[in-house]
Image: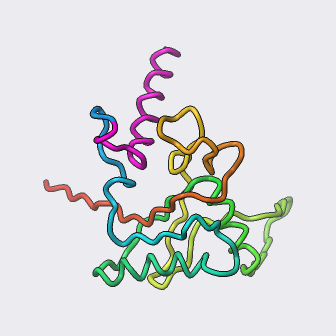
Amino acid sequence: MEIAEANLRIVIQAEEWADFNGNSSVNSLSYDGFDTQIVTNVSNNAGAALTATGTTIPAFDKVIKYIRNQGGNHIDGIYCSFGIQNVINQIISPANRYFINLDQKNVTLGAGDNVVSYQSPIGPIPVIGDFFVNPALPYPDADYAGSSGAQGSVVSTVYFLRHKQHCALS
């Protein structure tokens, strides 16, 4: 059972990697991932790391404006690497306000926070960290110092995606 589970995990991880990084012109067994498919409404931050000043958050709003100008009115998730998710937390956290209401006995108040949503001009959008957005070794064709890896590069792709809605007929 352990061997079957390990092999299934390998297949699942390969599919998730291909969702973001797959390129059928490089590997005929792969399908085209987001990096290959998304060619419009793209904003290049020219390799600049996200920071609390300059173009960081306006860069997010710029992509949202591209989407809105094409008729889009909803984004289901901002997909980014774990490293970029940490950078977003560090940028947004100082601007937050917290209201603490403890009405129960024996409740422990923890310190720190994790940004799970970005307040955009079209409403809140979940910020979803995914290892395969910018993985480190041993994944093929990947940035070896990926922002999801141990070194935590602060430069990576961020995807603003709308999930396809499915309908069921009965």
Looking at the image, residue 50 lies above or below residue 66: above
Q: Position of residue 133 (x, y in %)?
A: 51, 51
Residue 12, magenta (yes or no):
yes
Residue depicted at 34% across the width and 44% down the height: 23
Looking at the image, residue 68 lies above or below residue 81: below
Residue 55 or residue 97, whichever sits in front:
55
Looking at the image, residue 152 lies above or below residue 17: below
Residue depicted at 51% across the width and 45% down the height: 132
Residue depicted at 32% across the width and 78% down the height: 72
Q: Residue furthest left?
A: 170
Residue 105 or residue 58, whichever sits in front:
58
Which segment is the magenta one? 1-26
Which image quadrant for residue 46?
Answer: bottom right
Q: Position of residue 147 (x, y in %)?
A: 63, 51
The C terminus, quarter of image: bottom left
Residue 8, magenta (yes or no):
yes
Q: Position of residue 82 (x, y in %)?
A: 62, 53
Most common secondary structure along the magenta stretch: helix
Figure colour scheme: rainbow
